[in-house]
Amino acid sequence: MATRKRPASEEALMTDANIIKVISLLEPADPQAKPISKKDACAILGMAYNTTRLGTIINTFKEKQARDAKRRAEKRGKPASQDEVIHAIQAYINGEPIDSIAKSLYRSAQFVKSILERNHVPIRAASHDYFRPELIPEGATRDRFAVGEVVYAARYDSTARIEGEVKNDPQHGWVYRCWLLSDKWRQYCYQPACELASLEHLRTLGVKV
């Protein structure tokens, strides 16, 4: 049975942030404050006025928040498991942001970032600058790569496949012809080894590169 598609307004406004806002306005912490009407609450969420559905949305959200808080409390103070390490690295290499990974693991963003740094995973720049690429982690530097190997190209902030070894430049060392794998690029480029990060050490952890 096909489900009815939600209106565009609801798709845009039915966010966790807005649900939290609605709860705070319906149940103000200040006893002197006047709660908003349920009609206004529905409008904030972009949904048709329906008190029963509004109550279900709020209760479901509260239950999820309680479950998440319980899972976070259970994991607090515990080291990362091997599965968490692999999941965090795999998801990050595939382009998922740190905050999203942290949420899926019921951990903090700093916890996830420490996993990445400890395992020499190249960290994406908050604002990519082609002319000022991020430094390659020490544990991921290599002087030479193999044709067919998947690497991280810092200048393009993208994973890439080594297509060919071009030359051994006196100044930059080995230079490679690479195919950029990110959907943003999907093109060939030429990169020196010093601007490429090896991902082979992640394969030994069980990460699929």
Image: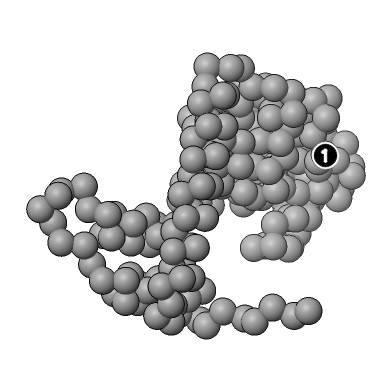
Q: Determine whether, in the image, residue 120 is placed left or right of residue 203.
A: left
Q: Residue at x 64, y 26 (%)?
A: 120
Q: Position of residue 164 (x, y in %)?
A: 86, 48
Q: Residue at x 28, y 60 (%)?
A: 26
Q: Determine whether, in the image, residue 190 is placed left or right of residue 114.
A: right
Q: Is residue 132 above or below residue 197?
A: below
Foreground pick, 24 / 190:
24
Q: Position of residue 103 (x, y in %)?
A: 55, 42
Q: Is residue 52 visible?
A: yes
Based on the displayed image, in which of its 4 quarters is residue 54 positioned?
bottom left
Q: Considering the numbered disc 1 on the image, is that residue within a helix, a strand or a loop?
A: loop
Q: Position of residue 113 (x, y in %)?
A: 54, 31
By what rule are the colours in the image chosen? one colour
How many marks can you see? 1
Foreground pick, 28 / 204:
28
Amino acid type assigned to the residue bearing label 1 in the image: Lys
Q: Quadrant of the N terminus?
A: bottom right
Foreground pick, 192 / 47:
47
Q: Is residue 180 above or below residue 14?
A: above
Q: Residue at x 10, y 53 (%)?
A: 32
Based on the displayed image, in which of its 4 quarters is residue 152 positioned?
top right
Q: Position of residue 29 (x, y in %)?
A: 21, 47
Residue at the extreme front of the image, as rendered = 52
Check disc 1 and report the residue beneath it: 208
Q: Is residue 21 visible?
A: no
Q: Is residue 72 above or below residue 8?
A: above
Q: Determine whether, in the image, residue 120 is placed left or right of residue 129.
A: right
Residue at the extreme left of the image, as rendered = 32
Q: Quadrant of the C terminus?
A: top right
**Mark 1: few, some, or many residues within 10 Å (few <14, many ≥20)?**
some
Based on the displayed image, in which of its 4 quarters is residue 196 positioned?
top right
